Amino acid sequence: MKVAVVGTGYVGLPTGVVLADLGHDVVCIDRDEAKLERIHRGESPIYEPGLEEVLHKVLKTGRFRTRASIAEGVKGAEIVFIAVGTPQGPDGHPDLSQVIGAAEEIGRCVTAPVIVVNKSTVPIGSGDLVERTILQQGANPEFVDVVSNPEFLREGSAIKDSYNPDRIVIGAKRKEAAEKLAALYKGMDCPVFVTDVHSSEVIKYASNSFLATKISFINAVSRMCELCDADVAAVAEGMGLDRRIGREFLKAGLGWGGSCFPKDVTALIAQSKDLGYDFSILRASSQVNDDQVRHFMSRGEKLLGGLKGKTVALLGLSFKPNTDDIRDAKSLEIIRLLLEKGASVRAHDPVAISAAEAVFPDVSFCHDPYETASGADALILVTEWGEYAALDLKRLASGMRQAVLLDGRRLFDPRSAEQAGFTYVRVGSKGPPEQTE
Ligand code: UDX
């Protein structure tokens, strides 16, 4: 099928290359020509494992092209995906200006039947809005189907997730449109769930909010475990063995960040409020998440006998491993808090340093974890990158002024950390006695 994808971000580009690899003719559209040039050269503009490999493959087939204008890119397309950004607006609602802008341009180009697909996470009712916007441009209503097909891929495993989704959700008014979109995914081994447009839009928000709440739940349990000397990982394991609960997304840590969970939880609370329902469980989930870093850092602060004048080193800046994305990353919250309290900050990340450098001119960024820890009073594990698990803890500890390790993601083994000379504190376990000033 002939497909156009508007937007080459964390969702649009993986979607485009994977559809091309499935055998479709794909045009990815973005007005950022420098970005398109990089894509054309086979360079991914984002760090996403496996993306460049598929990009190289599909560029060679000739089935994957890029265009800088929607008018050019959607010519002849049977299906047009809108995969542009929907950042959070000041009132908690997503800012839909990019979606509306894309819909207006698409509307001006409709000369034959086309299915326009909302792939970005958009508020309930956005399908209607996109349809209205397209028709206002004079498009023939007989030619236009607006369908919701939310994306569930995770950053850091976007390519793997795109080839192996748990499900494909399609929300459509007409059965024929749903069937045509389902045919695009032919060959994928997963259920295709077809429903109405509003339900599909709610599924995306409800899924992300549910997962975020599952994490907040285990983080609340972690707070209790710290107080009663239980171990949150053991609790999560014992809970997760119940198939009704499941083991995934029960990893206690510093809380959820990234470009989706914080924005989507806030948006669902706001949309629900507009509809006249107070989604209090989500407000609580958000509150637990907001408290998690503050609480963990106060444990560290007490252990160090204050933060003023101390040097604190961070391992990890991205909001999760295997991505360079620092949007709503816990590292940002931690750095702000440390700087406010008068500490000096050093930080390392395998791929996200350049993104963080632009935000924090006062932080020393190092390209080596041992150099980062050197001379510091505490080391905080913020993002559980695989390579950090292999660090030589003795070497890390020996270079530090005070060997304190605050493990925000429970990456290290407490015995190994203590044997290496660290005073070790982790989320969800009782820590060593606090220092008295
Ligand atoms: C999420 C959804 O999982 C995905 O389906 C949707 O399309 C986009 O939003 P993403 O934000 O890329 O994906 O990452 P995810 O792996 O879900 O992690 C989100 C946050 O939760 C991260 O900050 C991560 O560190 C945290 N997390 C995740 C935990 O703290 N514990 C867990 O057990 C799982």
Image (cartoon, rainbow, N blue to C red):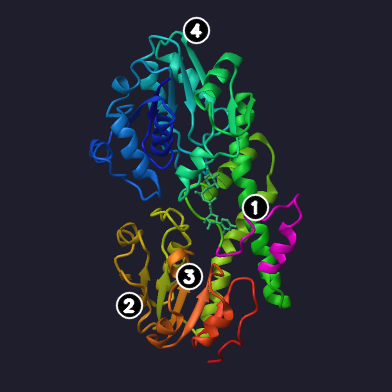
Q: Earlier in the sequence, mark 2 or mark 3?
A: 2
Specify whether residue 249 is painted magenta: yes
Identify which residue is drawn at 43% across, 79% down.
392
* Cα–Cα span, label 4 and label 1: 42 Å
Question: Which segment is the magenta one?
Answer: 233-254
**Residue ID for mark 4:** 142
| C-alpha gap between disc 2 and disc 4 | 64 Å
Q: Position of residue 271 (x, y in %)?
A: 60, 38
Residues marked 2 and 3 touching at CB (< 8 Å) = no
Residue lying at 49% horizontally and 86% vertically, measured from the top left? 420
Contact between labelled residues 4 and 2, with CB atoms less than 8 Å apart: no
Looking at the picture, which amino acid does disc 3 mark? Answer: Ala
Report the residue marked by disc 1: 213
Q: Which residue is mark 3?
A: 389
Amino acid at pointer 4: Glu
State if disc 1 and disc 2 touch (CB < 8 Å): no
Place of residue 75 in the rendered image (x, y in percent of width and height, measured from the top left)? 33, 17
